[in-house]
Image (tube, helix red, strand yellow):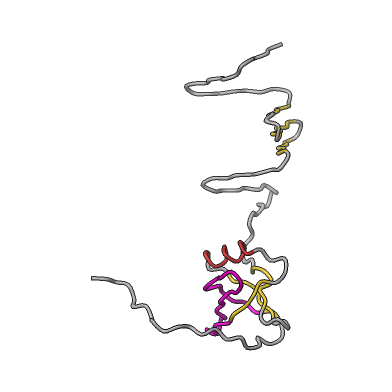
Amino acid sequence: MSTRAPVSKRKVKAATRSLGDGLHAARVELASEKTLRLRLPSGEVVTAALADGVERDLVTDCMRDGRHVIVVDSPRGPLVLGALQTARVMARDERGNLSLEARDVRIVAERSLVLEAGPVMLRLERSGVLKAEGERMTIDMATFLRVFAAKVELP
């Protein structure tokens, strides 16, 4: 026996009417190549386009996560200006510490990535060079350490 609610077979007609002055919040229900179907808090459905400079992937993320977008009236009709951010992406605690928690973290840099903490630096370069600088380096492995290299130099 299915516990799912029945799905309505009726088509939703999106209005192209004026939204009125100001900014409006909406949720993206459907995104096609050129238009977006948005639902306003009133329940009304409107068709909109992306404003210049707004990334389609941002709107796709909002649709997937159920986040609001910001819509404004224009001579072209309703335009999505961007997303409404309701939570900080990264927050600092009262001592200024920043924590990032995620299942996986990937940072991509076109030329180089540099991590610095005081006098210590870790640099990853596009050429394949990984450089660690500092006063001391400790490698503490509980069970196993393997080094693969064509050449190893120690002073």
Instruction: Please determine whether, in this image, residue 49 is positioned above or below residue 113.
Output: below
Quadrant including the C terminus: top right
Q: Nearer the viewer, residue 52 or 62?
A: 52
Instruction: Please determine whether, in this image, residue 36 is positioned above or below residue 115.
Output: below
Q: Residue furthest top?
A: 155
Identify the residue at horizontal 56%, vertical 71% (top origin).
Answer: 32
Identify the residue at horizontal 57%, vertical 81% (top origin).
Answer: 40
Instruction: Please determine whether, in this image, residue 134 is positioned above or below residue 112.
Output: above
Residue 136 figure quarter: top right
Q: Examine the residues drawn in magenta and state their main secondary structure.
A: strand
Q: Residue 49 location, x and y as percent?
A: 64, 75
Identify the residue at horizontal 75%, vertical 34% (top origin).
Answer: 118
Q: Residue 42 location, x and y as percent?
A: 55, 85
Instruction: Please determine whether, in this image, residue 134 is positioned above or below residue 108.
Output: above
Count of all numbered marks drawn on residues in the image:
0
Q: Residue 84 location, x and y as percent?
A: 64, 69
Q: Nearer the viewer, residue 132 or 93?
A: 132
Q: Which residues are magenta?
A: 24-46
Q: Residue 109 location, x and y as percent?
A: 69, 43
Identify the residue at horizontal 61%, vertical 61% (top origin).
Answer: 57
Q: Nearer the viewer, residue 35 or 54?
A: 35
